[in-house]
Image: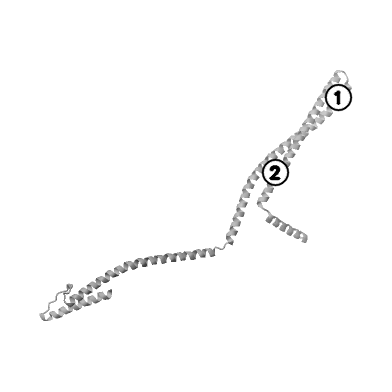
Amino acid sequence: MGLFDRIGRVVRANLNDLVSKAEDPEKVLEQAVIDMQEDLVQLRQAVARTIAEQKRTEQRLAQDAAEAKKWEERAKLALSKGDENLAREALTRKKSFSESAAVYQTQLDQQKGTVENLRRNLVALEGKISEAKTKKNMLQARAKAAKANEELQKTLGGIDTSGAMGAFERMENKVLEMEATSQAVGELGGFGIDQQFAQLESSSGVEDELALLKAQMSGGTLPPAPEVPQLQASPADAPKVQDSVIDAELDDLRRKLNDL
């Protein structure tokens, strides 16, 4: 392969690439429909010209056929008058017009075929143009949607949402913290009032019991002690048994005070 062939191929490849990149689907489709409509106009003009030629051929054919018939009648007239030379000249003229009419007839048959073919092509081209317009509108709509989606993706790709999402997370944590603090304050407020009354009630009960116990020890009677198993003891051991019972009650009272 020669150097110039390689250079030519590279140039064509680069030009094709540039053209492909420069092609806008919307503009290309619009231009394609315009080109097809121009072809339709030219085809209609060709059909019109062919039909006009056909009409002229039909007129010439009719004229030559009429002339041939006229000279045939004249030949008959000359023969009836006994003038063969004149009849021969009339038949010569008839033959010339008949041959011309035959040529026009052949030309007319060809023109009729051409006109019929052009009309079929015209109808087909009109159908293709109608279909192309429908496809053009659909493809242009799809191209616009694709461009809009591409622009949207570029916009979304250029937006940094990490900072905004971080702000949302910080504010969410702050709101949760505020809610927890508010709940804790409410619970502490309610706890203070209730517990103060509960402590007052509990303290008053202990104080009353302590005062009663002091009164009993100072000269009154002690409250009835819990039942304990009665032991068989001799009269000499009775004071010891009573002391052990009192010691047990005191120990039980100390434990209760320690539990408070």
The three-letter code of the residue at mark 1 reads Ala
- Location of residue 85 with respect to 253 vertically, above or below: above
**Callout 2 crowding tier (Cα within 10 Å): few <14, some 14–19, many ≥20:** some
Instruction: Give residue 134's position: percent from left, percent from top.
Output: 63, 45
Image-based side of 50 in relation to 221, left or right: right
The structure residue drawn at horizontal position 70% and vertical position 43%, both measured from the top left corner, is 37
Residue 106 picture location, percent across and down: 78, 33
Toward which corner of the image does residue 67 lie, by quadrant?
A: top right
Q: Distance between the residues labelled 1 and 2?
A: 54 Å
Q: Quadrant of the N terminus?
A: bottom right
Q: Can residue 186 be seen in this view?
A: yes
Of residues 67 and 203, the one nearer the viewer is 203
Residue 139 in the image, given as x and y percentages of width and height: 63, 49
Seen from the viewer's position, the closer of residues 101 and 180 is 180
Residues tagged 1 and 2 counted as in contact (Cβ below 8 A): no
Element carrying mark 2: helix
Residue for badge 2: 37
Residue beneath the point at 35% across and 66% down: 190
**Residue sitting nearer the eye, 174 or 87:** 174
Residue labelled with disc 1: 90
Does residue 245 show up? no
| Above or below 120: residue 235 | below
The type of residue carrying mark 2 is Gln
In this picture, is 229 found above or below 150? below
Q: Which quadrant of the view contains residue 2?
A: bottom right
Residue drawn 86% across the image and 22% down it: 87
Q: In which quadrant will I find the C terminus?
A: bottom left
